[in-house]
């Protein structure tokens, strides 16, 4: 395989005295969609925050395009081409949609290319064009998510960090948003590191997947294979083979334990 | 007719004093919105700005306008460093620590100014000192008019800056959602220091505009207390509100000084503040900000 775009190597990150990640390693190849699955509190968001520089790891390395970025401040990480779509969207509620998007391009000086990218975002999400002069706080949840994704695209990322894009959205909207995420990946060649609780759609969207539990990677494989694994099916997709129901369920163990 | 002219005169004088309160209040609000810190040394920064202008103009023989601009720049740089070196360290500490720190800084600035410039009031000649403009029976001091005009122009400049420029919008963004601003690659700390620089520069402008009306002395910073009332009246979070709150306090104070017995003038700003807290505690222009954690 070629050199990975991003290589996270045995990072350990703390919130004060609490250790949230206990040695996570993962790789994202150029143009790939990689997903990190896990339950609440598994440390998925922390992984993304460590990559984007909002948190610094205590130990371990974050190598992006051959350079260790683990201890760079977030603005330099953005300049290198990693843009973050935060969990819960995190809009600037009193700025207009357009101003929000322009903030995504804060680190860029090439105003002609920024204008082109704004147009690109409006083409991916026509709703945002209609609402560009409204305050972001007045948008619906789905529109805010579209805006958060567009805002990150405005930074012209090589790697897009997506934190729970399905959060709080209707199933139909989730389908739409993931359709566009796939398009962005294909058409722009942007690699994506996707964190999701909705394992079903994440595994359908991504190429490669990691499973995170209490701060550790416990499984990794191509998404096609992960989808076939019984433990993944049961614990993350909620599927069970018929007839198993009620049958000594407590004895079924996750393979990695 | 004469009564009407007098009333108008009082209102203009009051509005001029109020503009000064408003400019200081604007500094309070800018810093509070961005960093959730209340800078009780804001009035002292105004005093320092006025003294710097005095030194440049009276001692170094600079022209009024050159001294004016340079004093603003020096005070703004001072404000930037104050945040970058001192106040950045208390972010995340309890509000109490910030209050004590800025109050203490105010004491230090007063003492330092006393050592450096002495405790006697000083002044310098401005193009507006002791000149009047007349309109009919209305005679206004140019110093007061210059304060009002200066404040209006400054508010216009700030409005354009905050709504049209990249850095200005980034300042708004950082105030509204600090975490998201970090994610966007906005250098939030530097932006906050720049906000301090603007607040200090605006305070310096207030001090210099005020100098033809009242002398420059070490204790002029106590005016900050009235400005604080103005900021609360304006909603403590609304920039236009702070200036309007200031003008309101200034006018009420001026009218009280003329129509009410001696002594009332000094307490009116607090009376207005109390009245506001009882009738409309969120202030005149409270922005409903659903803060999400």
Image (cartoon, rainbow, N blue to C red):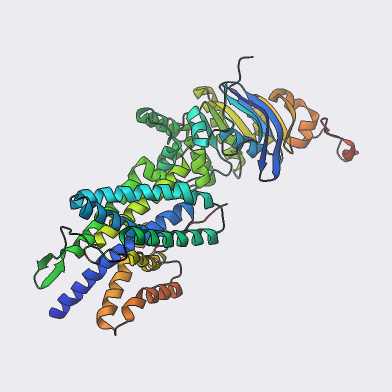
Q: Residue at x 37, y 53 (%)?
A: B199
Q: Quadrant of residue A240?
A: top right
Residue B255 or residue B39, whichever sits in front: B39
Describe residue A73's horizontal placement relative to residue B116 as left or right: right
Where residue A43 sits in the image (x, y, percent)?
Answer: 68, 39
Give the quadrant of the C terminus of chain A: top right
Where residue B273 sits in the image (x, y, percent)?
Answer: 40, 72
Q: Is residue B92 visible?
A: yes
Residue closest to the far top: A1
Describe residue B234's horizontal placement relative to residue A91 as left or right: left
Q: Residue at x 48, y 42 (%)?
A: B181
Where residue A170 sits in the image (x, y, percent)?
Answer: 60, 43
Residue B162 or residue B35, whichever sits in front: B35
Q: Is residue B244 visible?
A: no
Where residue B200 sits in the image (x, y, percent)?
Answer: 36, 53
Q: Quadrant of residue B27?
A: bottom left
Relative to A158, residue A57 above or below: below
């Amino acid at each position: 395989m070629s050199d990975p775009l991003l290589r996270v190597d045995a990072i350990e990150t703390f919130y004060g005295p609490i250790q949230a990640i206990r040695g996570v390693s993962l790789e994202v190849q150029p143009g790939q969609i990689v997903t990190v699955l896990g339950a609440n509190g598994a440390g998925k968001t922390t992984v993304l925050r460590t990559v984007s520089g909002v948190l610094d790891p205590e130990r371990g390395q974050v190598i992006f395009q051959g350079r260790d970025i683990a201890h760079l401040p977030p603005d330099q990480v953005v300049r290198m081409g990693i843009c973050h779509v935060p969990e819960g969207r995190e809009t600037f509620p009193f700025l207009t949609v357009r101003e929000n998007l322009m903030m995504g391009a804060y680190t860029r000086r090439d105003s002609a290319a920024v204008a082109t990218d704004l147009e690109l975002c409006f083409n991916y999400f026509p709703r945002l064009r209609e609402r560009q002069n409204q305050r972001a706080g007045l948008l619906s949840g789905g529109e805010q998510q579209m805006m958060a994704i567009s805002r990150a695209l405005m930074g012209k990322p090589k790697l897009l960090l997506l934190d729970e894009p399905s959060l709080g959205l209707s199933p139909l909207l989730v389908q739409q948003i993931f359709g566009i995420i796939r398009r962005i990946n294909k058409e722009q060649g942007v690699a994506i590191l996707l964190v999701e609780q909705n394992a079903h759609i994440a595994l359908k969207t991504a190429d490669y997947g990691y499973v995170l539990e209490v701060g550790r990677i416990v499984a990794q494989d191509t998404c096609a294979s992960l989808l076939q694994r019984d433990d993944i099916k049961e614990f993350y997709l909620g599927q069970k083979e018929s007839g198993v129901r009620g049958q000594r369920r407590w004895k079924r163990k996750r393979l990695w334990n | 007719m004469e009564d009407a002219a007098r009333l108008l005169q009082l209102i203009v004088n009051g509005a001029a004093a109020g503009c000064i309160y408003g400019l200081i209040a604007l500094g309070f609000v800018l810093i509070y919105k961005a960093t959730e810190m209340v800078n009780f040394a804001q009035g002292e920064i105004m005093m320092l700005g006025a003294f710097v202008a005095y030194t440049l103009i009276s001692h170094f023989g600079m022209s009024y306008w050159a001294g004016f601009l340079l004093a603003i720049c020096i005070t703004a740089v001072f404000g930037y460093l104050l945040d970058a070196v001192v106040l950045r360290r208390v972010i995340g500490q309890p509000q109490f620590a910030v209050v004590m720190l800025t109050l203490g800084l105010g004491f230090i600035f007063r003492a330092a100014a006393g050592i450096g410039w002495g405790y006697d009031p000083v002044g310098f000649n401005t193009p507006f000192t002791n000149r009047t403009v007349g309109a009919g029976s209305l005679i206004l001091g140019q110093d007061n008019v210059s304060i009002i005009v200066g404040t209006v122009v400054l508010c216009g400049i700030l409005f354009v800056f905050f709504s049209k420029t990249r850095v200005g919008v980034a300042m708004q963004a950082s105030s509204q959602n600090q975490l998201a601003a970090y994610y966007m690659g906005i250098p939030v700390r530097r932006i906050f220091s720049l906000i301090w620089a603007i607040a200090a520069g605006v305070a310096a402008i207030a001090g210099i505009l005020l100098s033809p009306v009242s002398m420059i002395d070490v204790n002029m910073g106590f005016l900050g207390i009235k400005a604080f009332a103005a900021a609360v009246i304006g909603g403590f979070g609304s920039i236009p509100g702070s200036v309007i709150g200031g003008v309101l306090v200034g006018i009420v104070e001026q009218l009280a000084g003329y129509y009410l017995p001696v002594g009332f003038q000094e307490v009116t700003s607090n009376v207005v503040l109390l009245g506001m807290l009882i009738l409309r505690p969120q202030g005149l222009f409270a922005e409903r900000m659903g803060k999400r954690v």
